[in-house]
């Protein structure tokens, strides 16, 4: 029996994780859950799974909710979060909080040398320079949940000999605006952007998928997780989301991982830690398949150029790229800017900073704060 701490339990990834755990109850015990909002959902989870510990980022929640009558001893401070994650009985930490807010949990898990299943790509993008060397030092195993990275993880040879890799191909659905040129996107609405063709996800990642910035974050994530130069990572648009990513090896073989789009597939692979766990899934009907591939539209190239620069120069650039995106996405969701302004806000914020080396996790938090202030100023200047 493995003790699991699931952070981001009330979210979309959290739900998929609980579905996999429910189907494999004999292998996993929910030792702790953490979330920031949605007390109704937290109440349901607590009732069904009876976790030993509950962490709530309380400042966001409604104090009069009935949840508090049943769960008066929840954890809420940063020290309590650290204590929960680093408890010696914890075997697996799932980092599935959305956005930069998930970094602390990822850091605490890696600091304690835990097995960490990482959905929170923003942690890796913002703090890869700190987290990856720390994981090596503390012997913390990082297993990706993001479908593309889990696909790459599954395609990797057992001995993980990176020298055998010629290229990693990350697939992208292309999002709801795949067929639209950038110049036609000025007036798209929040609803249009939220209408993802193949995946149902939380709000932030859905907007990131519409801008393709999710794919930029994934490029940086793959670069850090697999220690592969960006020049060996290609993005291929594959609208059906059946092939989740591929590796081409130096002998000309390409290995792809396929499934119908469901996050339960990469999650069960990650939770299995080398063993295949049984889950309910919809089989691919190969006789009905019609797979297609195309390059990323040229007019979105500027954002990938920035992501590739982050990979090449590293340091503070990842945290700045990520923070400016989070501020711009929030502004779009709150209807303060147009869809295409997201690109403008990121580019202009990014251009305000020079690249510098990062030495401590605290510096990441400082740059995050600075970049957010800068991005807010840029957004004000856009109107
Ligand atoms: P979501 O918005 O559905 O859920 C986010 C979860 O994080 C919720 O449980 C929320 O309460 C919690 N949370 C937010 N702020 C918090 C805070 N300050 N403290 C504690 N908990 C907090 O998001 P999601 O779609 O599940 O995505 C989660 C992460 O997984 C993101 O980093 C996303 O990029 C990544 N991811 C998601 C998918 C997907 O299919 N949804 C796929 C790949 C990667
Ligand atoms: Mg993904």
Image (spheres, rainbow, N blue to C red):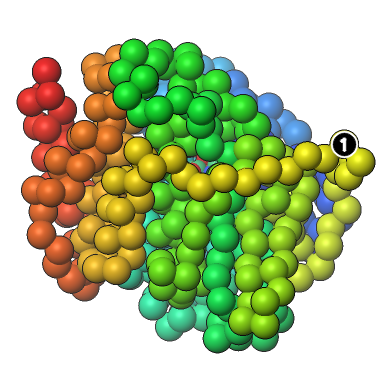
Quarter of the image for residue 324 reads: top left
Percent from the top left, x then y, of residue 372?
19, 40
State the residue at coordinates (17%, 54%): 366
Q: Nearer the viewer, residue 343 or 127?
A: 343
State the residue at coordinates (65%, 32%): 198
Quarter of the image for residue 57 reads: top left
Q: Nearer the viewer, residue 140 or 190?
A: 190
What residue is shown with label 1? 288
Q: Nearer the viewer, residue 253 or 341?
A: 253
Left or right, residue 15 beside residue 196: right
Task: Work out whether 93 lies above or below 375.
Answer: below
Quarter of the image with the N terminus is: bottom right
Left or right, residue 243 beside residue 351: right
Left or right, residue 327 beside residue 31: left
Task: Work out whether 311 lies above or below 54.
Answer: below
Percent from the top left, x then y, of residue 334?
31, 17
């Amino acid at each position: 029996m493995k003790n699991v701490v699931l952070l981001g339990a009330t979210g979309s990834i959290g739900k998929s994780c609980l579905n996999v755990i429910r189907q494999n109850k004999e292998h996993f015990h929910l030792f702790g859950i953490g979330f920031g909002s949605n007390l109704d959902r937290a109440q349901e989870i607590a009732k069904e799974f009876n976790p030993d510990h509950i962490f709530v980022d309380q400042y966001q929640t409604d104090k009069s909710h009935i949840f508090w009558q049943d769960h008066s001893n929840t954890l809420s401070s940063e020290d309590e979060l650290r204590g929960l994650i680093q408890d010696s009985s914890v075997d697996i930490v799932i980092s599935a909080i959305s956005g930069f807010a998930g970094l602390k949990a990822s850091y605490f898990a890696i600091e304690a040398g835990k097995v960490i299943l990482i959905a929170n790509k923003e942690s890796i993008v913002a703090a890869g320079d700190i987290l990856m060397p720390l994981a090596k030092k503390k012997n913390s195993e990082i297993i990706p949940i993001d479908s593309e990275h889990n696909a790459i993880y599954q395609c990797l040879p057992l001995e993980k000999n990176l020298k055998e890799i010629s290229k990693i191909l990350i697939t992208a659905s292309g999002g709801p605006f795949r067929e639209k040129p950038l110049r036609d996107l000025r007036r798209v609405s929040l609803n249009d952007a939220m209408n993802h063709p193949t995946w149902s996800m939380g709000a932030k990642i859905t907007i990131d998928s519409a801008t393709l910035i999710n794919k930029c974050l994934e490029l940086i994530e793959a670069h850090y997780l697999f220690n592969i130069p960006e020049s060996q990572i290609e993005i291929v648009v594959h609208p059906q989301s059946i092939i989740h990513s591929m590796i081409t090896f130096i002998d000309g073989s390409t290995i792809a991982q396929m499934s119908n789009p469901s996050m339960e597939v990469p999650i069960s692979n990650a939770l299995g830690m080398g063993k295949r766990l049984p889950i309910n899934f919809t089989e691919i009907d190969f006789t009905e398949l019609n797979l297609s591939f195309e390059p990323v539209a040229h007019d979105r190239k500027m954002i990938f150029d920035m992501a590739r620069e982050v990979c090449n120069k590293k340091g503070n650039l990842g945290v700045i790229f990520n923070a400016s995106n989070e501020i711009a996405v929030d502004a779009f969701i709150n209807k303060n800017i147009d869809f295409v302004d997201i690109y403008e806000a990121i580019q202009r914020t990014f251009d305000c900073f020079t690249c510098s080396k990062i030495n401590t996790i605290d510096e990441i938090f400082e740059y995050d704060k600075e970049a957010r202030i800068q991005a807010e100023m840029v957004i004000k200047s856009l109107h």
